[in-house]
Structure formats: C-alpha cells, structure tokens
Amino acid sequence: MKTLGKWFIVALMLVTAPVKAALDIVITEGVDAARPIAVIPFVWQGTGPVPSQISDVVMSDLTRSGTFKPVEELGLPQRDISSVDQFRSSQWSSIAAEAVVMGSVKPYGPDQYLVNFDLVDLVKAQMQSGSGPSSASEYLIDSRETVITAAQFRQYGHRISDIVYEKLTGIRGAFLTRIAYVVVNHGDKSPYKLMIADYDGYNEQMLLRSPEPLMSPSWSPDGRKLAYVSFENKKAEIFVQDIYTQSRSKITSFSGINGAPTFSPDGKKLAVTLSKDGQPEVYVVDIATKALKRVTNHYAIDTEASWAPDGQSLIFTSERGGRPQIYQVALASGKISRLTFEGEWNLGGSIAPDGRSMVFVNRTNGKFNIARMDLETRFMQVLTSTRLDESPSIAPNGTMVIYGTTYNGKQVLAAVSMDGRFKARLPAGQGEIKSPAWSPFL
Amino acid sequence: MDLKKLFKAMAVALPIMAISACSSTSDTETDASSSTSGSGSEQTSGGSVGTGVETGGVAPILTPAEQQRIKNQELRKEHIIYFDFDRSSVSAQFSEVLNAHGEYLVEHPNVRVMIEGHADERGTPEYNIALGERRAKAVSKYLQGMGVLPSQMSIVSYGEEKPLDISRTDDGFAKNRRAVLVY
C-alpha cells in the first residue's frame, strides 16, 4: 500500500509535467526517506491559459533532489492562495509537512511576467496557531518578486527550488545546472553526438556531431566551456569548445592516446592522459601556452586524472599495483600515495567539492558499481546496484552523483544520492546515452 | 584395395569422358555461333551457357611456397584478433593469422596497416582506451618481431567506443575485446 502511494505520487508528477522531456527521470528508490513539503500550484492572475506552471518545475526539482517529497496537491487545505497573507495556519494543522511554497504569476508587459513566491515555515505556523492570532510574517522564511520572460519560466522555477532547498537544508541547491553527455546511435551515418541539457534533461542542445567517437566531456569551472576527446581525424585529440560561441580549439594531438581531459579548479589547465612517450601517463597542459608538465612516470597504465578542489593534487587510476586502483599525486612534490584497497578494481575517481569524499567505479565479484569513500576514515560504501556502472560525475553541491549505466540492454544515465538512499533513472530516448558530466553552478 | 583405387579413378574419369563426349557432339553448333559472333574462343571456355559446352581442368601442382601463399591469402581475410578479459597478450590461436599478415607486410614494405585496439564495455571508458592501446601495441610488437617495419604500422585505440556487438552479454564482450588490422 505504501509502495502504491509512492508510485501514485511519481505518476501524478509525470502526468502533470507540461512538456515531455527528452530525458524524464524515474525515481527507483528512496522516496520514503524524503522530507514532506507542500507546494501549492502558483496562482495565475492573467487571462487565458497559463503560459507555463512554474510550481511543477519546483515540485519536480524538490522530488528529484531526493531530500523532499511534495505532498499530494489534492490533500492541501488551501489550494488557491498565493501569499502568506492568505495563509490560515489553523487550516493546516493536520498537514505533515515542514514548509509550504506558494506564489503567483501575472502579466507585466509584452512577454513579461511578474512572479511572486513565499516560503512558509509550516512547523512554526502550526506551533503558533494554538497561541492566538499572530503576524503571518513571523513564519515567513523567504519571499521574492521577479519579472521574467516566457522563455525563463523553467529557469526561474529552478531558481525558486534553489532558494527553497538552501533555506531548508543549509546546502546550496544545484537545480540551475546543466549536464553534458554523449549520445550514440549505432548505425547512423554520424552516430556520435555531444549534448548538453538542463540538469533535469530539458532544453537538450547538440554541441557537436561526428561520424567518429566523442568521449569524456568535462566542464570548465565557469560553466562556459567543455573539454572532450574527438576521433574526427581518425585519432584521439583533445578539444575545448565554448558552449555559447561554438568556437573550438584543439589542445593536444600527440601520437597515441590524447584522453581524459579535466579542467583545473582555476580553469587555466587541463589534466590529460597522453601515451606519446610509450605508456599512458598523466600530464598537465597549460591551455593558453600548451606547455606540458608530465605528472606520472610508470610502465603501467596511468589515466583518468581528476583535480582535488584545492588544485594542489590529482587523483588518478593506475595499474602499477597489478590491477586498476586509485592513487593521489601531490603536484608540487610528485609524491604518490594509493587511496583504494577494497574490492578488485577501483577506477575513474573524482573528489567531492568539499574535498572530504571521493566517488569512483568499484569492481567487486566482477560487478561494476559506483562507490564513495570517505577520504579521512577510508570507509568505502557501494552506492548503486545497477549494471555496468561507469563515468560518475558529482553535482556541484556534492549531494548527488550522475553516472552511466546499462538498463534493458541500453546505456542510460542514472543518479544516486551521496548517501546511496535515493536512486533515479533517466530513461533513454533514441540511442545509447553515456559519459555524463554535471556542470558547476551556473 | 586396388578395386577401390580403380573406382576412384573411374569416378574422376567418367565425368571427363562425359564432358568430352558432350563437346564433340556440339562442335557444329559452336562453329555456327562463332561464325556469327566472331568471338568463338571466349565461348568455348564459357561453360554450358547457351551452347551446352562444358570444360574441365585440374588444379595446378603447387610448390610448398605457393601453397603457403594461398593459405596466407585466406588467413589474411581474417583481420580480427580477439583477447581475453583485461588481457593484451596475443593468444596462440591467432599466431597463424598474424604470421600471414606479417609475411605479407614484410614482402610488401610499401604497404601500411592501421591496428585498431578495442575493449569491452566493462570498466571506465578512459581505462578501456588505455587497454585498447595496449592490445594494438601487442599486435604491432608481434608483427615487428617478424620484421615488419614500425613505419608500416600505425595504432589507434577506440576503447569501448566502437563495439562490434552491443548485446552486453559475455559473448558480446568477447567479440568486442579485439584488435583489428585495417589496410
């Protein structure tokens, strides 16, 4: 019965979604643990049909965060209010939720709309409703008023979600972010596509299409550029492309592997893998001067470097111990230390924005899953139970990981919360979807 | 035993006799048609098309070197070398195929070959690029050991990006762990 209710909420959410996205998230686990919140549909104060329902975006965002579970709309005692003045706390005494989001949208000019929203502390309101009338503003957590265009409805919805999420959790919301990924349609004349979309799969845009493979997109820290590998010249080469101007520049094109580019935290360098001198080794290349600095030197495979948030060290995958494991190298001293010991393989690691944990691919009993390790205690937790998991990418607020997996024989994207409790899948449209990269805050 | 040999000999001889008998009876027809088309020599070797004429022949006696060349030609039609999981050593079962390619490349120093390295879909894409390169290099080293010039060979690793089989089963994985010789 409980599960049925859970699916009802999810189903309702999907039915009310105004536009069918190319990628629509299906939550597979973890709704029960989420915190209830009430989101009242924003009141439309214009004539004719509402241009777009902002509160649907907010509800979807909060649900997808895994932290919140919007209360079913039909169960809300007041469904036509738009500000805290109209809020009657006495009517809300039986609602088990910690906060209420409400708002309004009204025409403001040609292609302009005034959007208001209030965030109400329901727990506080419920406690005070017994002690006689009080000023409603006492339990107002936040209130904003903004003018937007029709094209900005989704974007502003994400902005509201960011505010609500941060006010209630103390953690910055990552709803106004993008993901980059590769779509492959085997059999097409030009099967490889580099795409970007909003974090929830809406507003999908193609950045590059090629008859030859595209790999390993990685965001610049300002969210403006992507580094990636392209085989368009029948060999691996690293490019950086501006996502707004479309201008591309070739960064490395040595013989052998040119792979695994990741931007340094200051955006001036790329850590890359080159095999020009024999084995795959990690290098740092200065984007402006193209000057190379070799970081590793070993006859085994060294690859997949990722920066520590302070830019002082890299973690990378190395086979120097016989099997792929994750190592850390201090850039100043060149000192190398091994980080992972559990399981058969550990590879493809990246460090969370707070620098305290690391997310990577773990192979145990031949199964490939996403795992997280606390860098201080070295405690490792396998987060996923999907098949052939790879390419984990951490949200800029460190709460969620997006990764590539296999579902029904196809490559799809999936997401898991950093504690492993919330799990969701982004069903594939056409083709195989792989190599997701979560953008920084935009 | 001798009887057996005789039967064998007859089995070969009888069809030949039948063919020669057949061709002798249709001589006049052949002449007639050649007089109109003016290219009788082509017709006689053309089998039974229209005229009913058929010719027979025997395979030439080959020297061991010639036999090997023909065998190599067949082997060179095979240009994929498969590998075990997470392994990049060339297994003995593919040495014949690689020897055929190697001998051909040594005899033809102007011919260039591209060796593609591939991996299955397990592990990360970038690790698989490294693994694919190691497989391609193992093939290149093998050929170099036979005397193929390094300048004749180039290498590219596609990792798990160009699977032959996208079923993601053990059989599919096995087909994808490969090096491919592209001329």
Image (cartoon, coloured by chain):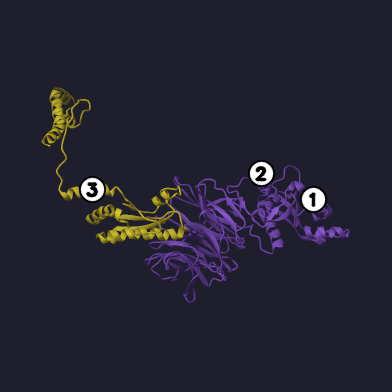
Camera-side residue of A435 and B19: B19
Height in image: A375 above or below A393?
Answer: below
Identify which amino acid the numbered label 3 is placed on: Lys
**Mark 2 burial class by Cα count in 10 Å: few <14, some 14-19, many 20+:** few
The residue identified by callout 2 is A15
Where the N terminus of chain B falls, by quadrant?
top left
Height in image: A381 above or below A181?
Answer: below
Q: Label 1 is found on which chain of the structure? A: A
Chain A takes which shade in the image? purple
Of discs 2 and 1, which sits in the foreground? 2
- Which disc number belongs to residue B71? 3
Residues at marks 1 and 3, CA–CA distance in whole angstroms: 85 Å
The residue identified by callout 1 is A81
Q: Label 2 is found on which chain of the structure? A: A
User: Which picture quadrant has residue B61?
Assistant: top left
Q: Label 3 is found on which chain of the structure? A: B
**Mark 3 burial class by Cα count in 10 Å: few <14, some 14-19, many 20+:** some
Tell me if I can see residue A72 in this picture: yes
Identify which amino acid the numbered label 2 is placed on: Val
Identify which amino acid the numbered label 1 is placed on: Ile
Q: Which chain is yellow?
A: B
**Mark 1 burial class by Cα count in 10 Å: few <14, some 14-19, many 20+:** some
Residue A362 spot, x, y in % from top left:
50, 61
Camera-side residue of A62 and B149: A62
Q: Which residue extends farthest right?
A: A132
Residue occupying image coordinates x 84% and y 54%: A90
Camera-side residue of A339 and B6: B6
